[in-house]
Image (cartoon, helix red, strand yellow):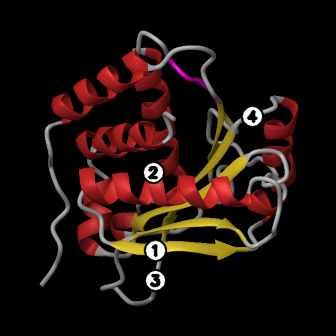
Amino acid sequence: MKKVLKNVSFVILLLKMCFIFGQESGTQKRIVIDVGHGGKDAGAIGINGIQEKDVVMSIANEILRLNNDLEKPLDIYLTRYSDTLISLSDRTKLSKVLKADLFVSLHCNHSDNPDARGIEVYASKKQAEYSIESVFVGYQIEKTLCKEIGYESRGVKFANFQVLRETVDVCTSVLIELGFLSNKDEGKYISNSNNIQLIATAILLSIQN
């Protein structure tokens, strides 16, 4: 039986997020949100021609908007702010220059199997200073997205992606595959602006500590 993604109340999620952030004190974390693909690199193409680069840009912009509305916002930077192609090396260099505490790369999945569904969170296969922290944050993000949104979990996995390999020595780093654009249900869900808000809120909830 298909697992239905939740259309939970955005207001409830936002209030929860504001409460938790309100309990935080001291210096806020510096976070780099890597907005996957861009420019001539569309990434995955899903149902109705939806493009991965546009979906993750919408989510990243919503994360910024929600964060800026908080009383004590996190220190968040994006690797791109428009539809431009940034090299993988330049994306990772940003986390080094900014001395980031956390690097989160946003992506969407695609499969030849139209029934493939769920989220995947990746940490680097490389053993480095921030390997354990990266796995912990990966599980935290996975748990929050599954609980708040209703995503089916495909697990926290290890990969040799360049953006992870080149950041795990510098800071905690993860890559999120936010559902399958090739899946009719998930592609339709993530195309809705209200659901973009929910996903962005869940990500903020999961990276606050």
Indicate which disc residue 55 carries: 2
Q: In the figure, 209 relative to 128: above or below?
A: above
Marks 4/2 in contact by CB < 8 Å: the verdict is: no
Work out how far the residue at label 3 is from the one at label 2, CA to CA, in angstroms.
Answer: 17 Å
- The disc placed on residue 111 is 3
Q: Residue 16: x percent and y percent?
A: 26, 29
Q: Amino acid at mark 1?
A: Gly
Question: Where does label 1 land, which residue?
Answer: 155
Q: CA distance from mark 4 to mark 3?
A: 33 Å
Is 54 magenta? The answer is no
What residue span does the magenta drawing correspond to? 73-77
**Magenta segment, prevailing SS (helix, strand or loop):** strand
Instruction: Kindly report which numbered mark, 1 or 3, lies closer to the viewer in this rendering.
Output: 1
Q: Mark 4 or 1 closer to N-term?
A: 4
Identify whether 56 is placed above or below 66: below
Question: What residue would you read off at disc 4?
Answer: 100
Residue 134, located in which quarter of the rendered image? bottom right
